Image (spheres, rainbow, N blue to C red):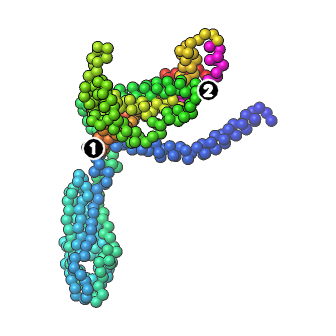
Amino acid sequence: MSDGARRRGEGALARREKRLAYSLLLPTFALVLGVILLPLLANFWISFKPVTLADLRPPQLIVKEQLRGKLAAEGDTARIEYRFRNSSIKYPLGEVSFTDTLPDGIKITGLDEACRIDETTAKLTCELGDLDAKSRGRIRIEIEALTGDPPGKADFRASAPAATFSAYNVMTSFDFTLGNFQKIFSAAEFWDVLKVSVYYTVFGTAGALLFGLFAAQIMQKAFFGRPVIRGLMLFPYVAPVIAVAFSWVVLFDPFSGAVNAMLQQMDVASGPINFFGQRMIEVSFFGVAFNLPMALTMVILFEVWRYFPLSFLFILARMQSIPSDIYEAAEIDGATPMQQFRFLSLPHIAGILAVLFLLRFIWTFNKFDDIFLLTGGNAGTRTLTVNVYEQAFAISNLGAGAAVAVVIFVLLLVFSIIFIRFSPKDAG
């Protein structure tokens, strides 16, 4: 076989393998599309619409049928009553009508002027025209029994009224607006909330990484009881967040908390400190007085305490993969522990530190439950994620909440691209 034929054969085989690989990966692509991309696109779609919680349920015509009176014998009279209403409080319904099939054994003695009856099929049609938002009304049909065994209420309920109408649905329309973004950017508190989010994310992420690095350095050395202590260090991360958040709230309670009692007994504090409810507190450090954001600092400390075990696990695993002979050679050359960490450990763990910082930055920036459980977003701890909740559910403005979520996504996307471009890599 010539070289050209061999290359053509290898090319065909490679193409078949590529098609097979794509076909095997197709379910994964579909799963990613369904779980990640579709909700993301839906969030972008809603952010450009004036959507409220009331708009999640599209306008409907609600029709209820009731039989007034009792048909027991031939000649008895009764009344069919149809009550209808527009379910929307904002949007009208156009060209409204409903149909219903009446049971056999009755005749109509009084027909509403909006309705007509098909005698051959006993099909009732009522045309109501246009209905304003929240409008309601009723239709009455007088009937008479034709037989000694007339139909009962169950026979009338067997055929449910079928409604037809045209309505405007803000969720599916192609009318878009920038009003949501104009509202959030023009709000006076938006930039303060953004500063709080950045402050909380940077210090929470850096603190978790530093404590994780410190713990990994300690746990790398062999000592008695190390496996037990390693397990205990994972407790903050694996414990349910609602349980540990409640424990912190009780521990730092200004009136019955153990921390306040200890500080007052040690004369560190002259009175109770509302750790999670006080926005600012004046602190004097070596004669320099400054205002400390009390509640925000406590939330950051909780973030560091709860999530440093994740950094600890990853950093420790990477450090244990570093060859021990380079440390032995460094000790022979007289390198101090600090020099060993700076010139040997740090270059090898730089990559995992960069990955952890990126992941923890994204997760912390999106963190909602910790802040909401500890402070509810009060006392200067309102972040962008809390703002999403307040816009979407507290004041029922889903469009503005989705717009804030889009801002969060864009900020994190830009940060991730820049960080990945310039982040350090492991030494090897």
Q: In this view, does 142 lie to the left or right of 12?
A: left
Q: Give the range drawn in magenta.
A: 314-331
Q: Earlier in the sequence, mark 2 or mark 1?
A: 2
Question: In what element is the residue under mark 2?
Answer: loop
Give the amino acid type for the residue marked by disc 1 in the picture. Ala
Residue named by callout 2: 321
Residue named by callout 1: 394
Give the amino acid type for the residue marked by disc 2 in the picture. Ser
Q: How crowded is mark 2: few (under 14 residues within 10 Å), some or many (20 or more)?
A: few
Closest to the camera, between mark 2 and mark 1, is 2
Using the rendered image of the protein, determine whether residue 306 is visible from the camera's viewpoint: yes
Question: In what element is the residue under mark 1?
Answer: helix
Task: Reply yes or no: does residue 378 show up in magenta.
Answer: no
Q: In this view, does 374 lie to the left or right of 326?
A: left
Residue shown at 33%/48% (left/top)?
Answer: 171
Q: Quadrant of residue 155?
A: bottom left
| Residue 116 in the image: above or below residue 399 | below
Residue shown at 32%/35% (left/top)?
Answer: 257
The residue nearer to you, when weighing 138 against 238, is 238
Q: Residues within 10 Å of mark 1 (few under 14, many from 20)?
A: few
| Residue 263 in the image: above or below residue 169 | above
Q: What percent of the width, then of the height, locates residue 419?
A: 46, 25
| Residue 155 in the image: above or below residue 178 | below
Q: What percent of the width, then of the height, locates residue 271?
A: 25, 28
Q: What percent of the width, then of the height, locates residue 238?
A: 47, 39
The residue nearer to you, when weighing 105 against 56, is 56
Task: Reply yes or no: does residue 323 show up in magenta.
Answer: yes
